[in-house]
Structures are given as C-alpha cells and as structure tokens.
Image (cartoon, coloured by chain):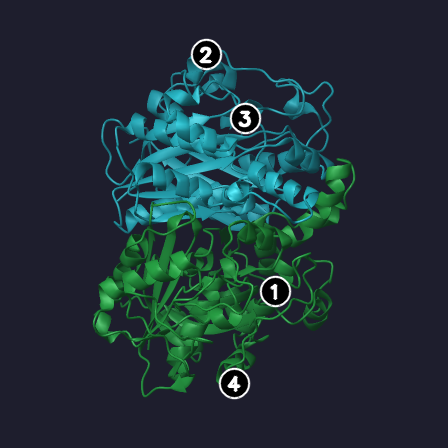
Chain colours: A green, B cyan
C-alpha cells in the first residue's frame, strides 16, 4: 500500500485576508497588508508598519461565536482552523483517528503583557483571566476542544519554523499509522513583546519590507493563523474529498551556527531543502516555485539565497517571499506559506514579491513580480527558518 | 528498531546529578515549593558560556552533557525538548524591562533567550548537532510529545541516537501566579510525609531538567527499552484506562510490575490516579514520585529516570514503600500521569 499524505483542506487568516478567497484576491490586486496597526497598542504604532489582521478581537469573536476576552491567539487559531475544516464532514472527525497539531511562539502573550503590568506593581494583583492563556498549549487545547478533536493534541515551538514542523509531524504520524486525519498549522498574534524584541535586535523595517532586495532593511512583523488538513488514503477512499495536493517531502535540520543568525553559506537551509527534495524523489529542476522564508533581513535573505544558489544554480524556479504581503507571522509563517504553496499547486499560480529593484550583490536571485497563472505548477518548495538555527523545508506536489 | 535509554542526566530537587540518588537519603521537603539542587556548572560547561546562560539553559545544557557522557556518545543525531513554560526567567526579564522602560532602550539578550526553542538550539549549538531539532510546548504532555517524536524518529531510522529532555523552571513570579491559580497548597505544615494525605486541593511546586540519550539498538549499557509513549486528550479516564489495556496487550504485557503514578496530593487529581490503578488492577504496585520532585508539567522526566534506574538495577529503595515487590524481578514498568483530567499520558518500559 502506498503511503501518501494528502492535503484535503486549508484555512488562513492574515493581514491580506480573513480567508482563502480574500488572500488570493489580495495577491491578484497586488495589495500588501502591511500598514499602520489599528489594534496593537504600542508606543511604536506610528513607527513600524505591521501585517495586522484587519478584524478586531471583538469582530473575530463575534464572527466565530466566541468570547471576545479570549486571547487573540485563540481567536485567530480557531478562525483559520474552522475554515480548514469547512468542507469536512463533522462525522469524519469522530469516525477516524484525528489529531490537532498547532504551533506558536507567543502563546497568550497578548494578554500576559497586560497582566504583568499590574503584577509588577503588586504581586497579588493582575486579572488572572489574563494569565490563563499564557502557555502555548492553551490555545491548542481551546481550539481542539471546540473542533471536537480528542485523540491527539500537541503544540510545537521552534521559532519561525514552528508550524512547518507541525505539518511535518502530522505527516509522520499519519505515515506511521498513528493517526488518519490531522489538522496541522500554527498561529501567532502581534504583541508588544515581539515587536519590542525584534526592534531591540534592530531588524524591523520602518517601511514596507523589501525581501530579496539588495537594499532590504529588515522585516515587518505580522500575525495570523493557518492550518492544513492532512489525511491518509484510507480516509480519502471513504469520504472522497477535493484534494489540493500532497505533501511529498520534508526535512528538519539545525544550522548550529548562532542563536539569531544563519551561517553565511546557509548550511542549515541548504540541508533542509536538500533533505526535503531527496524525500520527495525530485530533482531541483522539477521544482516550479519556491515560497522563500525571505524575511527581508540582511542575514536571512543572503543565507537563504546562497543556499538556493548552491542547489538550483544555474536554473532557478520561480520564487518569491509572500512575507512582503503578510509580514512575518513568526510561528504561523510556516503554515501560512504552506497554505499558499498548496493553493499554488491547486490553481497553478505563482505569487509575486511586493516590490523588487536590485538583486542581492553576488546572488542571482530574482523574484517574481507579478501574480500569474502558469501552465503547470506541479511541485512547490516552502522554506521556514528560525532563530536557534531551526530550519524546515516542505515540498508539496500535484 | 526500538528506542533504548543509554544515558541520563538529571537535575532535580533530589541529589540526582552528581550522586547516586537511590543510595543517598531521600531529601524530605517542607513547605509548598521544591527547588532543584544545582551542580557546579563549571565542571560541565565552559565558564565563558555559563555567564551568558540563564538558569534553565544551564540546567538543560548540564543535563545534556551528563546524558551524553553517561552514554559514551559524543554527539546526538537529533535534539528534542519538551518544556511547557520554556524560558520563564528571560521572558520575565524582557517583559519587565519593556514595561519599566516604556518600550524604549531594550537590550535584546533576554528576548533572544526567551523563546521556547532556545534550550534545544543552545544544546545543538554546543554539540554542533545539525540534525533534527524540535521543541514541544504542550502543558503536562510536553515531555511525552518529545518522547513520542523521539521514538518515531528512531523507528523511521532517521538517526541512531536522539537526545530528548523534559525541562521546566519555577521562578518567583510563576510560583506566585500558579499559586493564585490554585495549583499549590498552602505552605504551612506541608511536607513529604503528608503530601498525599492532605485531603485538599493543590500540590507542591516543583521543577527539573531530565535529559536522556536514546539509541535504536540496545547494548549492555542501556537502562531500559521504551516500548511505547502515548498521550490521550479530552477523553474520560475510563476510556484512557481501556486504551492503555489495549496498548499493553499489543505489547504482550499482561500486567506491568510497577506503576509509577503521578499522584500529586490534589484531591481531584489523586482520585483519578487511584481509579486508574484500580482499573489496571495495580493498586499494590503503585510508586509515587511527586513528593521527590514536586508537581510541574514535565515531571514525567523525573519519573522516566526513576523507572529506567529501577529496571536496570532491579531494586527499589525502601523509601518508595513497595516492600511487596522486593526480591521480584522487575521486567516492565508503566508511567501514568495526568492533570485535571485533560491530558493523560502513558509510557511503557521494559528491561533490555
């Protein structure tokens, strides 16, 4: 019996749209979601444009029939997971072994930072309802219970590759016959904590970010959630869903170079991409599109570019960084971009970079500039690299 | 391909790191908070690096060094960590500065090390381990998630060895917040002899760092084989027990010799532990451990160390209070833990 893992559903919310149709529409109109934030209260509000989801907590809660006092992380996570399962018969979740694997780096920090302000003044004060959401597992539990998923639940946190690893684990658990259906992805909401953290590292762009450009000046932080529904062939034979694509390869490596920087040669990214290609049984020339990690920082884009050059030179597939539209959604970014990659295959599309003027010196990496339909997108490589050297690449195939 | 524990490094509120705990007097506790006994880190980590590390990173790194040394392995093929709360000290430091400085003039060091994955990545950096690297952050099944991944990775034949750990630190803030949330009993009169009889809500706070080097082929050095690790979420305790029975029969184990159980002194939690043991007909083989390490989300790391040692040495310290088993060969052990009837976990171990 072949052991394929199929993608049978997807859901997404980010700065460019509250669902899949809105997201695709934003790419088509070349509309970036990066602008002055409306919901995050920070003294840097006017200083840094952000990829903020347009809906407020109240609107998200109202839309999904939830309590608006929940953490934004939970609200976003449930919103996207629900879309991912929208065409899925509810009975299937009960009749098969189902899991929910989520990922996050901030957890309920959006609430914790309010709690802590009071707590600092007086350790017996602070609204306990605001600290209940702190740990990353809380959001996963809340959403899993709402979705009535009960066999297997866990949460991964490997910085910016977190949700790519959630998708990878989902596939491995299906292949090892532990689960039949897994909703896998991740979520992160914007917080003062992360904005100030990245700002203290001096890698946040004060304007719209410019990934892959010689004159790039840092990243724009974003927020969002995205999930894929991964199933085995047994489930597919039983309920015959419309399948987007399959997950044909993945690889997780560690760059082991520096806590916050990739090695100049992009060794971790290189071996992650190579490992994922090897597993999918594909030659580099068979990849039609690469959704790059492409944060817009000096370090990431040159290291990732170098690693791509080492594998693909001289014939590069189409490539771009969709973070120039969504901002860097941190723990959600691997899943956000996995959803874009799966849709690229389903609709035979290539996503653009928001802007591009000059290639990085010494590298011949020229991103796509226009949203376009291509004759055939059969294989897409999606990269996610994070602090701590955590590198994961995924390959999606028709 | 199996999964065998070959090396262990563990820092806990007991003398588990530098000395042989079973042979020492078990340290009694008083009050509602147990703290780790930390080793002289300079014996295990380069002095320059120690200064840059927060307490949890020091504990994780030293335990890892020890686990590898114990196994006689230089570099693991993969690093997988479970931590529910991650690097709390650095998170608090950055949060505090951010609030006090009103979002200006912040030093990035604490932020860099506040991420949950910084423990696993620091370990990878130290050993130059370029293979698979992951961090699980799911409440009281964080360590079990890491162990499930470890067993799977070894089964997939992806690598020959995995360094897996369960680690959580307690800070003054996290202690007071969790106390406010009802996780711990009042300080007065609580001690190691009355924890399980208190007939009240809450437990005693604990912390620890337990790292294991696991390999896919057994040898003489190995402590025990991990036969299975499984977690159960949002199902009734009755259903958990019946699934555990199925799992045991899949592994051809009629009845394990000991049940290392997560009893924590909380009235409601202990009811579930008790009824689980009854359903498995193992009431006379229960070994409790939280009076030794306290309650914390990755406490099963401590339990796994205990199980591995008991199986390897085939002996039970008298302090464990299981006289009925003395002299009997211990072939199999199961570890069962749960919290608030939400997530349950089971680990099955056998002698190699």
| Residue position for label 4 | A29
Co-location on one chain, circles 4 and 3: no
Q: Earlier in the sequence, mark 1 or mark 4?
A: 4
- Whether residue A172 is visible here, answered yes or no, is no
Point out residue B111 in the picture as x, y percentages from the top left corner.
54, 45
* C-alpha separation, residue under disc 1 versus residue under disc 2: 51 Å
Q: Secondary structure at mark 2?
A: loop
Q: Secondary structure at mark 3?
A: helix
Q: Nearer the viewer, mark 4 or mark 3?
A: 4
Q: Quadrant of residue A288?
A: bottom left
The chain under label 3 reads B
- Whether residue B319 is visible here, answered yes or no, is yes
The chain under label 4 reads A
* C-alpha separation, residue under disc 1 versus residue under disc 4: 24 Å
| Residue position for label 1 | A76
Mark 4–mark 3 CB contact (< 8 Å): no
* C-alpha separation, residue under disc 1 versus residue under disc 3: 37 Å
The chain under label 2 reads B
Co-location on one chain, circles 1 and 4: yes
| Residue position for label 3 | B293
Mark 2–mark 4 CB contact (< 8 Å): no
**Quadrant location of the N terminus of chain B?**
top left
Q: Earlier in the sequence, mark 3 or mark 2?
A: 2
Co-location on one chain, circles 3 and 2: yes
Mark 3–mark 2 CB contact (< 8 Å): no
Comparing B247 with A338, the one in front is A338
């Amino acid at each position: 019996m072949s052991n394929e893992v199929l993608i049978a559903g997807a859901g997404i919310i980010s700065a460019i749209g509250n669902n899949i149709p809105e997201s695709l529409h934003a790419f088509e109109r070349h509309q970036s979601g990066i602008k002055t934030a409306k919901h995050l209260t920070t003294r840097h509000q006017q200083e840094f444009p952000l990829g903020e989801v347009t809906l407020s907590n109240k609107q998200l809660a109202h839309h999904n029939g939830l309590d608006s006092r929940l953490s934004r992380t939970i609200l976003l996570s449930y919103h996207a997971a629900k879309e991912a399962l929208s065409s899925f018969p509810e009975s299937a979740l009960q009749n098969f072994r189902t899991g929910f694997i989520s990922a996050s780096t901030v957890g309920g920090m959006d609430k914790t930072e309010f709690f802590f302000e009071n707590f600092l003044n007086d350790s017996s004060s602070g609204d306990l309802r605001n600290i209940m959401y702190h740990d990353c597992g809380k959001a996963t539990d809340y959403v899993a219970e709402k979705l009535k998923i009960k066999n297997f639940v866990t949460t991964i946190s490997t910085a910016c590759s977190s949700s790519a690893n959630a998708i990878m684990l989902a596939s491995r658990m299906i292949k090892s016959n532990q689960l039949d259906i897994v909703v896998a992805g991740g979520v992160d909401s914007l917080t003062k904590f992360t904005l100030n953290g990245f700002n203290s590292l001096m890698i946040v762009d004060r304007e719209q970010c410019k990934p892959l450009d010689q004159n790039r000046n840092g990243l724009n932080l974003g927020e969002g959630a995205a999930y894929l529904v991964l199933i085995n062939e047994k489930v597919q034979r039983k309920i015959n869903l419309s399948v987007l694509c399959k997950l044909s390869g993945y690889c997780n490596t560690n760059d082991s170079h520096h806590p916050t920087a990739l090695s100049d040669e992009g060794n971790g990214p290189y071996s992650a991409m190579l490992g994922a290609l090897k597993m999918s049984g594909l030659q580099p020339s068979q990849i039609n599109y690469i959704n790059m990690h492409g944060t817009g920082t000096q370090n990431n884009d040159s290291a990732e570019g170098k690693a791509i050059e080492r594998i693909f030179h001289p014939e590069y597939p189409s490539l771009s960084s969709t973070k120039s539209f969504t901002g860097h959604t941190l723990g959600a970014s691997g899943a956000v971009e996995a959803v874009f990659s799966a849709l690229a295959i389903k609709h035979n599309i290539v996503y653009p970079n928001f802007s591009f003027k000059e290639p990085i010196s010494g590298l011949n990496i020229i991103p796509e500039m226009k949203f376009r339909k291509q004759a055939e997108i059969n294989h897409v490589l999606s990269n996610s690299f994070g602090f701590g050297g955590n590198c994961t690449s995924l390959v999606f195939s028709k | 391909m199996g999964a065998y524990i070959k090396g262990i490094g563990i820092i806990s509120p007991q003398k588990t790191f530098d000395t042989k705990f079973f042979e020492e007097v078990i340290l009694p506790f008083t009050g509602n908070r147990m703290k780790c006994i930390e080793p002289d880190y300079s014996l295990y980590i380069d002095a320059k690096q120690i200064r840059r590390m927060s307490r949890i990173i020091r504990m994780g790194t030293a335990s890892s060094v020890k686990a590898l040394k114990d196994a006689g392995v230089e570099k693991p093929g993969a690093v997988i960590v479970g931590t529910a709360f991650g690097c709390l000290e650095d998170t608090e430091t950055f949060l505090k500065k951010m609030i006090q400085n009103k979002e200006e003039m912040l030093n990035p060091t604490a932020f860099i090390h506040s991420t949950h994955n910084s423990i696993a990545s620091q370990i990878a950096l130290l050993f130059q381990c370029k293979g698979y690297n992951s961090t699980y952050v799911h409440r009281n099944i964080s360590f079990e998630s890491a162990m499930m991944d470890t067993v799977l990775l070894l089964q997939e034949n992806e690598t020959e060895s995995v360094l897996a750990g369960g680690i959580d630190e307690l800070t003054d803030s996290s202690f007071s917040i969790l106390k406010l949330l009802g996780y711990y009993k009042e300080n007065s009169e609580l001690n190691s002899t009355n924890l399980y009889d208190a007939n009240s809500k809450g437990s005693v706070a604990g912390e620890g760092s337990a790292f294991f080097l696991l390999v896919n082929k057994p040898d003489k050095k190995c402590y025990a084989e991990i036969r299975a690790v499984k977690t159960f979420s949002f199902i009734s305790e009755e259903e958990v027990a019946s699934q555990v029975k199925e799992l045991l029969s899949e592994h051809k184990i009629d009845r394990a010799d000991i049940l290392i159980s997560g009893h924590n002194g909380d009235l409601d939690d202990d009811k579930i532990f008790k009824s689980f043991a009854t359903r498995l007909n193992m009431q006379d083989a229960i070994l409790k451990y939280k009076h030794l390490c306290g309650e914390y989300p990755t406490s099963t790391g401590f339990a796994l160390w205990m199980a591995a040692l008991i199986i390897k040495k085939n002996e039970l310290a008298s302090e464990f209070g299981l006289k009925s088993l003395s002299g009997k060969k211990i072939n199999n052990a199961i570890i069962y833990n749960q919290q608030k009837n939400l997530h349950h976990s089971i680990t099955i171990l056998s002698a190699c």
